[in-house]
Amino acid sequence: MSDSIPKYVGPKPTDRVLTRDEVKARFDQETAAAYSQQDPIYLPDYASALALVIEALCAALPDEPTILDLGAGTGNLARRVLGAIPNSYVTLIDFSLNMLSEAPDVLADFKGRYNTICEDFFAFDMPPATFDGIVSSFAIHHARGRAEYGRLYQRIRSWLKPGMVFACCDVVAGSNQQWTAMNEAGWQQHLRAAEFDDATIAHIFANYRVEDTPISLPEHLTLLREAGFAHVDVLWKKHNFAVYCAQK
């Protein structure tokens, strides 16, 4: 693993899942550049997975679409959206001002085509039928419990215009403990193949255990249907990572 890759600090050791306020505080103290890598090697097939998010989005977009990026961080997914979809305009929402402060550098080629909102998207609300598409990458897993995922999906559906698409790339749990363990073992193998040492892998998983509360893909699809989406699908899965989508 190259020493030039920015290092993330990660949360302090704890034996409990962090509150969202604690997660926000961690991101506000983090090295933001660590999250603006174009193809971070600790995530399998990162670039192709995000390309699938954009491909799913494009299936229903009008000309000059307005797109919402939930948990946008430094703007890594927004950069791909703006580069792939001509005349698009992206609203980036994230609860960390520190992460969003990196967005002007990440999106330097797209001035005038985006805006940022520093809010917790789990609590923030917007007018109905505001967006032509909604995307997210590695952020929704901060929902705490099935009910909060469900409420978020209901609001996402309300923010979309009729016929438009929500697409997400995120970490997911297995449908049972055995499959969760198998998926996580696959991620560990990926990290070893990328030449992460055992201490770094342990640090990554310690972060994952206390910050992330993923649910399984079947649960995501059920909640999206319950929220009123007409069509839901899984486009890709590898280890404990997946791309899934829903059309209003």
Image: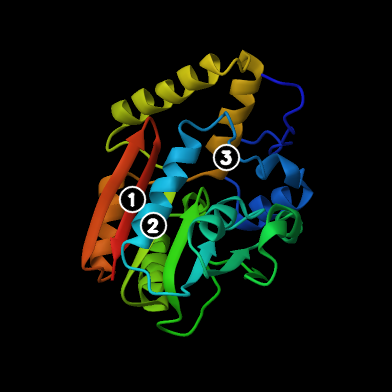
Mark 1 touches mark 3? (CB < 8 Å): no
Q: Quadrant of the N terminus?
A: top right
Foreground disc of the pair 1, 3: 1
Residue at the disc numbered 1: 244
Q: Are marks 3 and 2 in contact (CB under 8 Å)?
A: no
Could you say where residue 218 lies in the image, as x and y percent from the top left? 25, 47
Q: Residue furthest left?
A: 230
The three-letter code of the residue at mark 1 reads Tyr
Q: Residue at x 42, y 27 (%)?
A: 184
Mark 1 vs mark 3: which is more N-terminal?
A: 3
Tag 3, which secondary structure? Answer: helix
Q: Residue at x 59, y 34 (%)?
A: 40
Query: Label 2's element?
Result: strand
Measuring from the top left, give residue 32's x and y in whole percent.
Answer: 74, 47
Instruction: Please indicate whether residue 92 sits to the left or right of residue 220 in the image.
Output: right
* Mark pair 2, 1: CA separation: 6 Å
- Name the amino acid, label 3: Val
Q: Are marks 2 and 1 in contact (CB under 8 Å)?
A: yes
Work out whether residue 21 or residue 161 is closer to the camera in this orientation and state it.
161
Residue position for label 2: 167
Reading the image, the residue beneath label 3 is: 210
Answer whether residue 153 is visible to the viewer in this image: yes
- The earlier-in-sequence mark between 3 and 2 is 2
Is any part of residue 118 visible from this angle?
Answer: no
In the displayed structure, 42 sits above or below 85; it is: above
